[in-house]
Structure formats: structure tokens, C-alpha cells
Amino acid sequence: MSTDLTLKMRSAIVGAAERLAASHRPLSFDEYLALFAANPSLHSRDAAPWLRDMFVHYGRYEVSHPTGKSQRFALFDLPWESQDAQVGALVGHEDVQAEVFRVISAFAEQGRVDRLVLLHGPNGSAKSTFCSVMMRAMEHYSQQDAGARYRFSWVFPKGRGSAEGRIGFGARPEDGPKAGESYAHLDDSAIDAKVLCELRDHPLLLLPIEARREVLLAALGDGAHVPDYLWKGGLSHKSQQIFEALLSAYRGDLSRVLSHVQIERWFVSRRYRVGAVTIGPQMAVDARERQVTASRAMGALPASLQNVALFEPFGELVDAAGGVLEFSDLLKRPLDAWKYLLLLIETGEVALSASNLSPNLVMLGSANELHLDAFREHPEFQSFRGRLELVRVGYLLDWQAEARIYWQQVAPSVRRHVAPHAIDTAALFAVLTRMKRPTSDRLSKELAALAAELTPLEKAEIYASGRIPSRLDGEQAKTLRAGTPALMSEGQAHAIYEGRVGASPREIRSLLLESSQSSGYRCLSPLAVLDDLQQLITRKSEYEWLRVEPQAGGYHDSLGFLQVLRKRLVSQFEQDLREATGLIDEARYVESFERYVLHVRAFVKGEKILNPVTGRDEGADEAMMREIERALGATGTPAQFRGDLISMVAGWAIDHPGERVDYLGLFPRYLDRLREAFFAERRERVVSLSQELLVFLSGGADSLDAEARARSERALARLCDRNGYCEHCARDAVSTVLHETERS
């Protein structure tokens, strides 16, 4: 091992040791008060304000959707993790993030948690992922200075020269600690007993309530939001017993009682169930207690405590104290098994056999829609409704976001090459199964008429990218684009909302993994995905979404979706091949259209344009404009068509100040027609080059002349470099396109 490497390793170890020592240094109560006084707002939080501040700590940023702009909380991207560790990040669901943040902020403002946040949605809709990512953020935040949390323990040192080993204090009060003395920094060898507070009580709870309020008001000022937990609360039962016994032994001297207090920072840990706990359905109350007075350590306690029956609580509620407790599939529990939550939510306490427990936590739950529907019919539902904050978590309706899930969770574990369009095809199928046929209940007359004609694929494309069907004219496209938010809201306004029924990410993830093992293809191929989807559709008895009857317009028609996807896939293969041949470049369509718009703008305004060839200012190129307009299928007079087009560009610019015009999004119909016109002129040549490429990829390079081989090599290089193909999936794509060409 090199000397430099050894030095770096030692430096890293020393640095880590110093950080650990600093974060784990025990404090006396007076030292903690000084820490509190330096930043009282940071150290006077209970679970809800701490969680709210965690959301704010990682920041938020704006994301744009066809339905508008929304705020995304960065913590759900796991920005502190390495790229490999970000696999579990939450994709989409910005509306859920905003709603949960709103609820937690309300808890923080009112000073207490008085509801259980219940995430409800279909199976596999990311409810558990939401909670998991939130808990991972809690772990990281608790390690930052801004997320520091402190708890205390009771420390009893060995006796001072007594043969009987009296600790803390002996039979005489004068044997106890002197004024200003603290046992917080004693070495372990000098300690006979250390009694933990399992509920991680806040250190300020050690102060009598009147003194505590004076401290809080002096530090925070009048009008500050102080949690009820600190303003009205008290120590847990065991700590209160120890406190009272010491106070009695020291004849009311609080400073000597606090000498036995050792304050330490604590950190959230999912693995070790500290402040972040997930539990599944179970029959028992989630907390219990056991007597601890008989243990050896307790035998070293002062005599006044040895006669007190001390009980320590344990269980999930205790483990989660100070943080978050997630009830996974809450409604799968028998109702009687979690009725105690009513009292816990209402009062913040739950009764155990020997004491009342005040865990100071935020409770999350998850439930699928079927169980929630059944619960709504239960006679006890109204008792719980006011104590539940319902947050809907439906399936994603943006297929591009859905694809990111599979790129994160499937692609890294697939040992084969992932062919272009494979994951997109699976994601789009999943979203198509979730599309709901539009109704006219909440839409304007014009928008309702357009929505009624939308196919599931068209609707999915609108939700994902705002791409308006190319069959619509300019005014219709404008109406549909402006009405997209209303269209999505209309789908959410019913009990069977859009995103409640459909293929789940879990099912599609399993299908992709199966497709990656297909014996018919060397890659994870979109053709294999389509084949496996065909097989999946035959298993109607296993999936609720397959048992939904097809509806008008092609909705819930899984077989029809496969036909649509196969046609779309062939079109994508064709487009990739067009660009790979070098005869047709996607950028040329947009450049030609941009040049056309530039000349139209000059024509409408009566201005001149600089000719880059001649260097002179000239009028708009009428011949070029008419040629483009023929390809676009322009109707009406040229002046009217051009005026309408410039009005649309101007309207877009007003809504997107300072941004480059998105011609693909604004004029998809025209770009499609321009693309087809370019292709029609070169179709025979593209087919010929594709045939050469198939021969080349099938091992017949020797049968091609040198020029044909060079063309094929260039085409393959473009397919690989630009689109992510390999030789195997490129051959599959070329073969599929040529087969479809022969059929047509």
C-alpha cells in the first residue's frame, strides 16, 4: 500500500473520529441550556416542526407539467445520496408532497398533532415509497446541525469512598452532588447506573412547568409558536418517578437533581428503529411495558428508588418517539386492534398497564382504496373521520415519469443491453390502462366536444408532454391546450378517479424483468415487451384492471392498446432509421419550419430579412413559403393562414416570456406533415439503405460493395451513438420496419 494512500486513510479515520466525538459529546444540563439559548427556535421543536423544517431544509424547485407548474420538494430526490443509492427516490407525486407538507405545517402551527395522515390509493402507487424516502431524509437531516435533536439519561456515579458503594447519594443528603457539580462527564468506569429515557423526552421537560414556560418565553418571545408538548407536557412516567425521588432526597434542590442528568444528541435510524418505524398489520397495541427495577443496574440505584416499581415502555410507539410511525396497510388491521389510536390522536397519550405514554410523533398510514371504501361503510367510520387526514396517492398519469421508475429500478439490474423504446413501451402501456374516458360534467362545451374525441394514447401524450393531436386545427389545439388542467381535474373528480384503476408499477416491473430474459431476443427489446404484454392480457382472472369492460373510444381495451403500441413502435423505428441513413435529419424539419416562421413574420409585418448569402436585406421568400404551406396542407388564403400562425407564436411568447419558442410542442401537426413530406420524397432511398443495413447486420457484409458497407457502418454508428442501439436490437428494428413496409 502506498504511503500517500495510507496517509489519506488515516486522515479520513481521524476526521471521522473527530466528527463522531463532537456529535456524541455528552452535555450537562447547564451546557444544554447554553446551547438552547444560542438557538432557541432550533431546540424547541417537537416532531411536527422538526419534520416541517426538514422539508424546508432541502429546498424545493419548480417543475412544469402540461397541467401547469408545481413545487417539488428536493428531499424526495435523495440529493445527498450517491447516484446508485438514489434508486429509491420518489418519481412524480408533487401534489402528494405538497399536501403532506401542508398537513405537517398545520400541526406545527397549532402546536400539536391531532390527526393521522392516511395515504390511500391503489396497490403499488408509491405510498410506501413516499414514507420510505421521507424516513431516509429524516436520517440524513438528523445528522445535520439544523436537524440536531437531544435526549437525556439519568446518571448515578459510584459512591464517594463508601465501602458499601453508595451511588448518587447515600443515606445522608450531604453525600450527594455539590452545587454546580454534574455527573454528565464521568467516565463509564465511575458510573454504577445509567437509566435511559426510552421516549427520548426533551431535556426542557426536566424543568418544572412554570420555570419551563419562563425559559421558553424569555428565549422565544411572546407570540412564539411553542408546541403543546413543551408548553403543557411533562416527563415520561419512569423519568418523573426518578425526578421526584431525587428531588425528595435532595430536599427540593433542583440543581442537585439536574446534576444526575446527562444529555446526548440522538439520530434517526430506520434500521435500529430510532425515531422512524414502519409496522405492518398486527393485533396488539403498539406499545407495552415491563418492570426493570429488578435488573442489576437498577440494584445500584439509591435506596429511595429501589422501593419504587419502575417500568420501561417498549414497542413501536416507543421506538418511533420524536419522529414518525408508519402504519403500513392500516385498514387491514381489525378495527379493535387500533381503536386506541383515537385516544392517542385526541389527547397525545395512550394508556398502558402502569402509566400513560406520550410518544410525541407524527403518524402516517397507508391503505388501498378497496379497504378504505369498506371502512367508509363501517358504523365507526365517522368516529375516525375527524382524526384522519386523507391524502390520495393514485398511479402516475405521465408515462415519461412512469418510465423513470423503470430506468431507476429495472435497468440497473438487467444484465442485457436495454434497447431503445423498451421501457417507454412498457410505461406507456401502464398509463394507457389508467386512462379514464372524459365526461362533460365539469368541462366547457367546446372542451367537452374535443375531449370526447380523444383516444387514450392522445390523452396520455397530452398529460406527458402537452402534445396536442396533429389532427386538430389551430383553434381546436389552442382550446385543448388551455383546457388541459380542467381535463385532468375532471378525471380526478369521481370516486373511480383517473389513476385508481390500471396496471401497477410492480406488475410492469416484473414484466420487464421477464422480458429481459426472453430467448427470442439478445436485448431487453420492446418487441419482447409487446410479446409478454400479450401473454399478460390473457390472465384476466389475476388482475382487476383486465376485468374492466372496454369502453367507447378505446378506453380499457388492453388488446387495442397493444395494436396502438405496435404501430407506434414501428413508426419510432422508422424515424430512427430515417435519421440514421443521413438523408433525413429531425433537426432539418424544425430548422425549415423556423425559417418559414421567420419569413412569415417579415411578410406579416412588411419587414425585410438579411440574406446570409448575398448580405443584403430582402423581402420574405414567397416561393419558399408556398412550398412549405403546400407540405403543411394550409387552408384559406396565404395571408390568413400566415396571420393565424403568427398570432399563435405571439400568444405562446406572452405565456413563456424569455423562452425559445417550442415549435414541436406548439405546432405538432405541422411538424408531422413536414416530416412526412420530407420522407415521402426519399422513401424509396431510405428503404434501399435499410435493406443494405439489414444485410450488413445479418453477417452479409462481404456481399456488399465497399460504398454500401461504408454507408451501413455509418448508419449503424448513428443508431448506436444517437439512439442507444446495439447491433442486435438494430437488426430487430430494421427487420421489423422492412417487414411492415412489405405488408403495406
Image: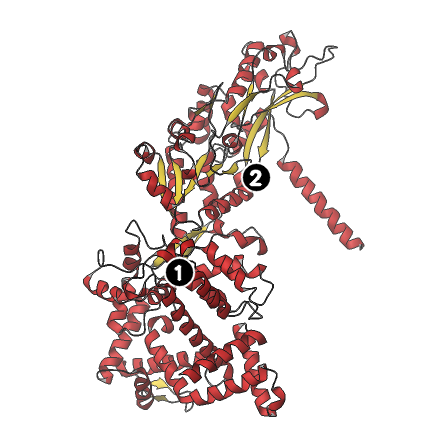
- Dividing the picture into quadrants, the one containing residue 563 is bottom left
**Mark 2 or 1: the one toward you:** 1
Q: Is residue 405 visible?
A: no
Q: Please give the residue where the numbered disc 1 appears in the rendered image.
A: 431
Is 398 drawn above or below residue 616 in the view shown? above
Residue farthest top in this picture: 172
Is 219 drawn above or below residue 559 in the view shown? above
- Dividing the picture into quadrants, the one containing residue 657 is bottom left
Disc 1 element: helix
Q: Please give the residue where the numbered disc 2 appears in the rendered image.
A: 269
Residue farthest left in this picture: 445
Task: Say which quadrant the C terminus sits in.
Answer: bottom left
Q: Is residue 518 left or right of residue 112?
A: right
Using a 10 Å C-alpha cutoff, classify the residue at mark 1 as few (fewer than 14 neighbours), some (14 to 19) or many (20 or more).
Answer: many
Q: Position of residue 362 (x, y in %)?
A: 44, 36
Q: Is residue 329 visible?
A: yes
Is 173 drawn above or below residue 124 in the view shown? above
Query: Which residue type does callout 1 highlight?
Result: Val
Query: Which residue type does callout 2 highlight?
Result: Ser
State yes or no: discs 2 and 1 in contact (Cβ < 8 Å): no
Q: CA distance from mark 2 to mark 1?
A: 36 Å
Instruction: Decide which of tag 2 and tag 1 comes sooner along the chain.
Output: 2
Q: Residue at x 32, y 74 (%)?
A: 470
Q: Position of residue 552 (x, y in %)?
A: 27, 64
